[in-house]
Amino acid sequence: MKKAIVYARFSPRPDAPECESVDKQIWDCRRWAKKNGYEIIEEHSDKALSGSDAERPGLWDAIYGIKRGMTLLIRTWDRLARDSYLGEMIQMEVAKKGATIVAIEQSESSRDNPESKLIRTILLALAEYQRQITRARTRAAMRRHQAEGRRMSDLVPYGWKRDPDNDARIIHDDDEQKAIKRIMELKAEKLSLRKIGAVLTAEGFVARIRDRKFKGETATTKGIWHPQLIRSVIARANAA
């Protein structure tokens, strides 16, 4: 019998559909393998890891274990990667070992011909685009909720603070809102991010880089005005 290794991955999103669960993917691959005359010798998975993340232990264990003439079984190409470049690199690694990849629900894209390669490229590109759209939609939803005063995580965005009367909500931090206003004024004057940071420091504005709740207490870490912090403040202000 032909030998295969199964790889499955599910999204870290809390609303990921059931069909993306690792158990369901592995079960589908087992059924397909039995029907098509494959013997599964290993099964690997990554739980709650993004398809754009190259640091996936289960994925690399699967690739390490694969031998010449074997097949790596996945449910769909987006389980392998949600990044076109990463997906191509994984395919190259498998090909170097003399093995192949079969996406059981997209078998027409798993053949070794130009048409199938084109389909694989398109599917990986679509997966990457979908990931970017999901991230943009999530960020937009978080901004809307924060604008309504809802706390979305332990990290409170700059310009806001926890509501002392309701820990589930956030309210404006007047001093930090003044800093944001000053940042936008300096940006309008076309100052560089480093220059903006120098002006803010000279004028006594505080750069809060972390505000987390730990054992019922709020711990605030103050830092310097790094360009990246200023860039993120500007991006958030522009998106508001």
Image (cartoon, rainbow, N blue to C red):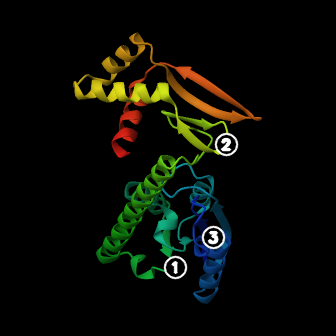
* 189 horizontally vs 196: left or right: left
Let me know if residue 81 appears in the view: yes
Asked if the residues shown at circle 2 and circle 1 are in contact, with their CB atoms under 8 angstroms apart, the answer is no
| Residue denoted by label 2 | 167
Image quarter in which the C terminus is found: top left
- Amino acid, disc 2: Asp
**Marks 1/3: CA–CA distance:** 16 Å
Q: Which sits in the foreground, 173 or 16?
A: 173
**Marks 2/1: CA–CA distance:** 47 Å
Q: Residues within 10 Å of mark 3 (few under 14, many from 20)?
A: some
* Of labels 1 and 3, the one closer to you: 3
**Marks 3/2: CA–CA distance:** 33 Å
93 w.r.t. 218: above or below: below
Q: Position of residue 160 (x, y in %)?
A: 52, 35
Instruction: Residue at 54% x, 74% y: name it.
Output: 75
Q: Secondary structure at mark 2?
A: strand
Instruction: Residue at 47% x, 56% y: name it.
Output: 141
| Residue denoted by label 3 | 21
* 2 horizontally vs 195: left or right: right
Q: Earlier in the sequence, mark 3 or mark 2?
A: 3
Q: Which sits in the foreground, 5 or 166?
A: 166
| Residue denoted by label 1 | 104
Image quarter in which the N terminus is found: bottom right
Q: Position of residue 132 (x, y in %)?
A: 40, 57
Instruction: Residue at 51% x, 47% y: name it.
Output: 146
- Amino acid, disc 1: Ile
Q: Secondary structure at mark 3?
A: loop
Q: Earlier in the sequence, mark 2 or mark 1?
A: 1
